[in-house]
Image (tube, rainbow, N blue to C red):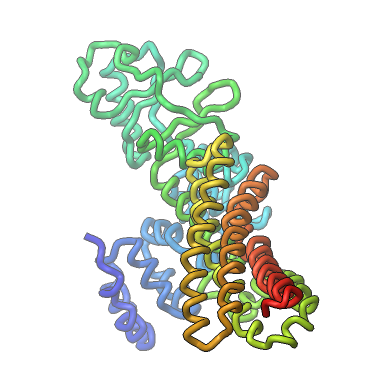
């Protein structure tokens, strides 16, 4: 059983490292799962990380390397020679090895490939040709396949033979004489079948497959829809070239969620919590400058109504409430719409229905919060007409929030952009401008009419 992170011996390890107690370090690390070793390394300083990493056995070090984030992986890769890295890469499956080699400078990548088994190097070179975020970039070349003419016994023997080099075998893939994918046989079905029977007789010819050029996000949706453990990958001619396993898809899902989370917050997806202050500054500053530029658009609206605010100063007290409530309502709408787009729950023909629904929700919430705000403003001693003004502006801005929070992500999706970018850049501008314009604009109308 893996050790829980809160019980990991980080402090004990630091003490052993300070004493340069090699045996003590090895004793603390030995019982840990590679995932837990990676968690321990994250709690150490740079020189300590490389010192401990060099004490690990090659198979453990190889597994640990795959569990670390990009920043720490780069640190460790830089700390070993090309020959040592080749030994670590040689322990990995082809998809993981491709991820490591693909991040290296060309000269070093060639040295590493020259240092591993020729067949493994050929697989890695083949996988490097595919974009990282496609099915081809996520697949591994290791799989179990048999011809349509094989018997069940021959298929079982192939599973036994390949099990020495392949982990997590759950299916045997069946191909024709030219290597084109014909179907799949689940391992449990294979074991229970008559050994002398033809493999073709128990093959699922409707098994889901994917071509190498399909985007990783779409592959993840297929895994979810069909409850798959792995999926065969074929080339444009239908020939079987690899498989994608569920552990790779879990990584894809985590990556996609992180990207959406960062983009909603206007953050660079490459930033990590342990980055230096300078790196974080460089990644955040451009987004803040963009937000500053859009904020001046809202400020310009306020400037137009400067005389209106001067005649009734209490407007300056309440107008941030209208804009802020619009921003919060828009964030709720964006979260629902972006999630629906990400999970494929929002087909194009439903866009109008969703837009109407979100506008109605905005209207209902605007009426509710507007009534509450009107009551609070009266309690605070404001003119009842100011309360009415607050109610009308709140209602208008939450409708704007529902509309913009829906239409902008949809428009970005249709234009091929990431809809998660919509929140703080475009929608917040809409609700700020809409809030100030509705509140101050109505105030100006009320004053001209002699109501205020």
Where residue 140 appears, as percent x and y from the top left, is 47, 39
Q: Height in image: 9 above or below 126? A: below
Q: Position of residue 226 (x, y in %)?
A: 38, 33
**What residue is shown at x 49% (from left), y 62% (from top)?**
365
Foreground of the two, 255 or 301: 301
Residue 232 is left or right of residue 350, and the answer is: left
Judge left or right: residue 321 versus residue 142.
right
Q: Position of residue 119 (x, y in %)?
A: 51, 37
- The vertical placement of 15 against 403, above or below, is below
| Nearer the observer, 381 or 203 | 381
Q: What residue appears at the point 67 percent right and 68 percent down from the top-left corner?
A: 438
The quadrant of the image that shows the N terminus is bottom left
Whether residue 215 is situated above or below residue 191 in the rendered picture: below
Q: Residue at x 69, y 86 (%)?
A: 312
The quadrant where residue 249 appears: top left
Residue at x 46%, y 40% (from the top left corner): 221
């Amino acid at each position: 059983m893996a050790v829980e992170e809160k019980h990991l011996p980080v402090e004990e390890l630091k003490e052993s490292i300070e004493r340069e107690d090699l045996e003590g370090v090895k004793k603390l690390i030995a019982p840990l799962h590679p995932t837990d070793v990676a968690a321990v390394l994250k709690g150490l300083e740079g020189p300590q990380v490389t010192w401990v990493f060099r004490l690990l056995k090659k198979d453990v070090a190889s597994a640990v390397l795959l569990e670390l984030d990009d920043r720490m992986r780069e640190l460790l890769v830089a700390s070993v020679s090309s020959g040592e890295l080749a030994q670590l890469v040689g322990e990995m499956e082809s998809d993981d090895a491709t991820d490591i080699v693909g991040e290296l400078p060309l000269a070093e990548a060639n040295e590493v490939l020259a240092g591993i088994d020729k067949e493994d190097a050929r697989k890695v070179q083949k996988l490097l040709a595919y974009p990282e975020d496609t099915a081809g970039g996520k697949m591994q070349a290791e799989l179990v396949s048999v011809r349509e003419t094989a018997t069940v016994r021959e298929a079982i023997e192939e599973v036994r033979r390949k099990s020495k080099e392949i982990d997590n075998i759950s299916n045997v893939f069946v191909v024709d004489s030219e290597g084109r994918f014909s179907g799949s046989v689940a391992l449990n079905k294979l074991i229970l079948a008559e050994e002398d029977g033809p493999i073709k007789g128990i093959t699922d010819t409707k098994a889901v497959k994917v071509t190498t050029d399909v985007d990783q996000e779409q592959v993840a949706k297929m895994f979810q829809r069909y409850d798959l453990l792995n999926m065969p990958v074929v080339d444009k001619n239908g020939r079987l070239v690899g498989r994608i396993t569920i552990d790779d898809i879990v990584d894809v899902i985590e990556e996609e969620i992180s990207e959406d989370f960062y983009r909603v917050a206007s953050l660079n997806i490459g930033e990590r919590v342990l980055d230096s202050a300078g790196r974080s500054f460089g990644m955040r500053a451009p987004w803040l400058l963009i937000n500053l530029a859009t904020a001046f658009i809202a400020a310009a609206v306020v400037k137009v109504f400067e005389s209106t605010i001067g005649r009734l100063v209490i407007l300056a007290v309440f107008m941030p409430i209208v804009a802020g409530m619009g921003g919060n309502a828009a964030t709720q709408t964006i979260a629902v719409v972006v999630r629906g787009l990400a999970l494929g729950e929002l087909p194009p023909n439903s866009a109008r229905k969703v837009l109407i629904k979100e506008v109605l929700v905005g209207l209902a919430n605007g009426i509710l919060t507007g009534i509450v705000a009107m009551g609070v403003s009266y309690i605070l001693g404001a003119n009842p007409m100011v309360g009415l003004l607050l109610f009308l502006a709140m209602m208008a801005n939450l409708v704007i929030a529902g509309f913009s929070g829906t239409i902008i992500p949809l428009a970005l999706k249709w234009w091929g952009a990431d809809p998660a970018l919509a929140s703080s850049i475009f929608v917040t501008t809409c609700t700020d401008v809409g809030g100030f314009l509705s509140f101050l604009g109505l105030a100006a109308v009320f004053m001209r009419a002699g109501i205020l």
